[in-house]
Image: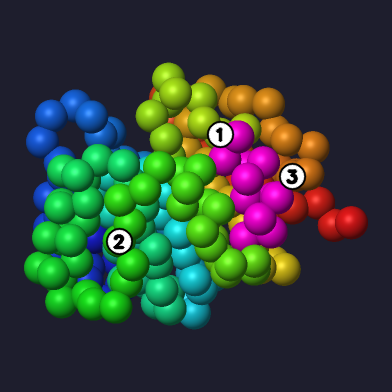
């Protein structure tokens, strides 16, 4: 696992041991970030269900202003901190919280990009999206990117702006519907 592009290009990252996390493959991550290329610079990001933190770190490498990393696993939090430290990245929030508590703690319009990659079988997508909408966490042009293995019912407050399937992984890009 490595950083694909930007300031930290080519640098290796570690992942939590065991099978509790599912790191996004480099090829898949490269496709994702090609689709996000113009949305990353100067953005404020949230890597929810962060695992190793590789998605948020890739955002920072490509010019994001900030990234909040959130996971419930102590091992994942330790790995995220190790990865950030190894790259010399400081000043980013790393939170050991469940997604409900984390989403309730953020300020309105705080994020330009929220990346959701929960355990596929947990099916947290709809509830997380409902909380994101309720808390109004997205900036005016903000988007949520969901990594999933099958499409789920999109809450009515959101509209799909892009979709891409790569092998068994699907990316769904969502924006809030304009009121």
Task: Name the side, left or right, on which 12 lies relative to 137.
Answer: left
> Taking the image as drawn, is residue 27 in sight?
no
* CA distance separating discs 2 and 3: 27 Å
Q: Earlier in the sequence, mark 2 or mark 3?
A: 2
Seen at 53% across and 52% down, the residue is: 103
Check disc 3 and report its element: helix, strand or loop.
Answer: strand
Which of the 4 image quadrants contains residue 128?
top right
Task: Report which residue position mark 3 lands on.
Answer: 158
Task: Name the side, left or right, on which 57 lies relative to 8.
Answer: right
Q: Quadrant of the C terminus?
A: bottom right
The answer to which of 71 and 24 lies nearer the viewer is 71
Seen at 74% across and 53% down, the residue is: 176
Crowd band around label 3 with a 10 angstrom C-alpha radius: few (<14), some (14–19), many (20+)? some
Is disc 2 in contact with disc 3, using a CB cutoff of under 8 Å? no
Query: What numbered label is drawn on residue 94?
Result: 2
Pinpoint residue 110: horizontal percent, then vertical percent. 57, 69
Task: Name the side, left or right, on which 81 lies relative to 109.
Answer: left
Residue 130 part of the magenta-drawn span: yes
Q: Count how many numbered circles sit on residues in the image.
A: 3
Seen at 43% across and 78% down, the residue is: 65
Which of the 4 image quadrants contains residue 16?
top left
Pinpoint residue 154: horizontal percent, then vertical percent. 70, 33
Q: Earlier in the sequence, mark 1 or mark 2?
A: 2
Residue 155, placed above or below residue 76:
above
Which of the 4 image quadrants contains residue 159?
top right
Query: What numbered label is drawn on residue 125?
Result: 1
Where are the magenta residues, as a range?
Answer: 127-137
Residue 98 part of the magenta-drawn span: no
Check disc 2 and report its element: helix, strand or loop.
Answer: strand
């Amino acid at each position: 696992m490595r950083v694909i592009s930007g300031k930290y290009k080519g640098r290796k990252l570690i992942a939590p041991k065991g099978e509790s996390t599912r790191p996004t493959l480099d090829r898949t991550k490269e496709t994702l970030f090609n689709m996000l290329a113009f949305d990353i610079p100067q953005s404020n990001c949230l890597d929810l269900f962060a695992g190793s933190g590789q998605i948020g770190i890739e955002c920072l490498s490509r010019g994001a202003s900030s990234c909040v990393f959130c996971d419930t696993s102590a091992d994942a939090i330790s790995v995220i901190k190790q990865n950030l430290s190894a790259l010399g990245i400081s000043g980013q929030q790393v939170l050991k919280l469940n997604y409900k508590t984390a989403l309730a703690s953020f300020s309105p319009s705080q994020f330009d990009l929220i990346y959701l990659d929960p355990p596929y079988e947990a099916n947290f997508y709809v509830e997380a999206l409902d909380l994101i909408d309720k808390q109004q966490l997205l900036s005016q042009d903000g988007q949520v990117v969901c990594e999933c293995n099958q499409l789920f019912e999109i809450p009515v407050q959101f509209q799909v702006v892009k979709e891409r399937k790569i092998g068994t992984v699907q990316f769904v890009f969502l924006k809030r519907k304009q009121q």
